[in-house]
Amino acid sequence: MERGGRTTVLLQERSSGRVLPLRHLRDHQPHSSPALSWNGRYLALLVQQGGRRQAVIEDRATGRLQPLLLPMGLEPRRLSLAPDGQRLALEVIAGGGQRVELFDLSGLLEPDLAPGQRQSGGGEGALQP
């Protein structure tokens, strides 16, 4: 939504209509391309950092903001976060062309699993890679 002349992402609870705080994002506007993990623990989006756009992930459980460091020359355009928060697809512009980069976040973020899913243990009903 537009707020104060800048594009801002607001996270709103459907049941109550209450706007949920996004602590680290106020100083990094405009926002674009938001994506939520399964239970809404992780919010990935593009923010403005000085003269550059930056892909970041806010962990709403810990309040931590995790920037996704990109090599020089890559300009993020859009992103998509896997429901469990373990992978991120990022469309980038590089050298006049566009491509999609896939990032494995499993060493960075805990899985945000759907209700009834298990993280490990194998056997029937276990998550498959």
Image (cartoon, rainbow, N blue to C red):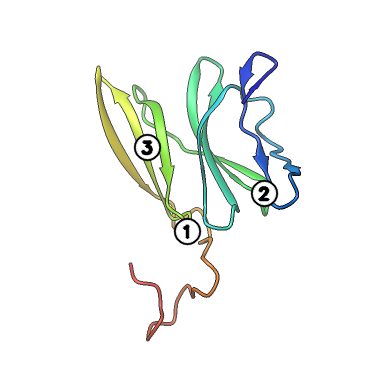
Provide the residue designation for mark 1. Answer: 84
- Distance Cα–Cα, label 2 vs label 1: 20 Å
Q: How far across and how far down the image is residue 106, in percent? A: 44, 57
Q: Does dot 1 land on a helix, a strand or a loop? A: loop
**Is 98 left or right of 1, judged from the image as shown?**
left
**Circle number at residue 90:** 3
**Is 36 left or right of 126, judged from the image as shown?**
right
Return the disc, 2 or 1, that comes first in the chain's sequence: 2
What is the crowding at mark 2: few (fewer than 14 residues within 10 Å), some, or many (at least 20)?
A: few
Which residue is drawn at the image coordinates 31% and 24% (left, top)? 93
What is the crowding at mark 1: few (fewer than 14 residues within 10 Å), some, or many (at least 20)?
A: many
**Residue type of the residue flagged with mark 3:** Leu
**Circle number at residue 13:** none
Placement of the C terminus among the 4 image quadrants: bottom left
Depicted 53 relative to depicted 22: above or below: above
Q: How far across and how far down the image is residue 66, in percent? A: 56, 42
**Proximity of marks 3 and 2: CB atoms separated by less than 8 Å:** no
Return the disc, 3 or 2, that comes first in the chain's sequence: 2
- Distance Cα–Cα, label 3 vs label 2: 27 Å
**Proximity of marks 2 and 1: CB atoms separated by less than 8 Å:** no
**Proximity of marks 1 and 3: CB atoms separated by less than 8 Å:** no
Which residue is drawn at the image coordinates 52% and 36% (left, top)? 45
Placement of the N terminus among the 4 image quadrants: top right
- Could you say which is closer to the camera, residue 26 or residue 38? 38
Provide the residue designation for mark 2. Answer: 14
**Is 44 left or right of 90, judged from the image as shown?**
right
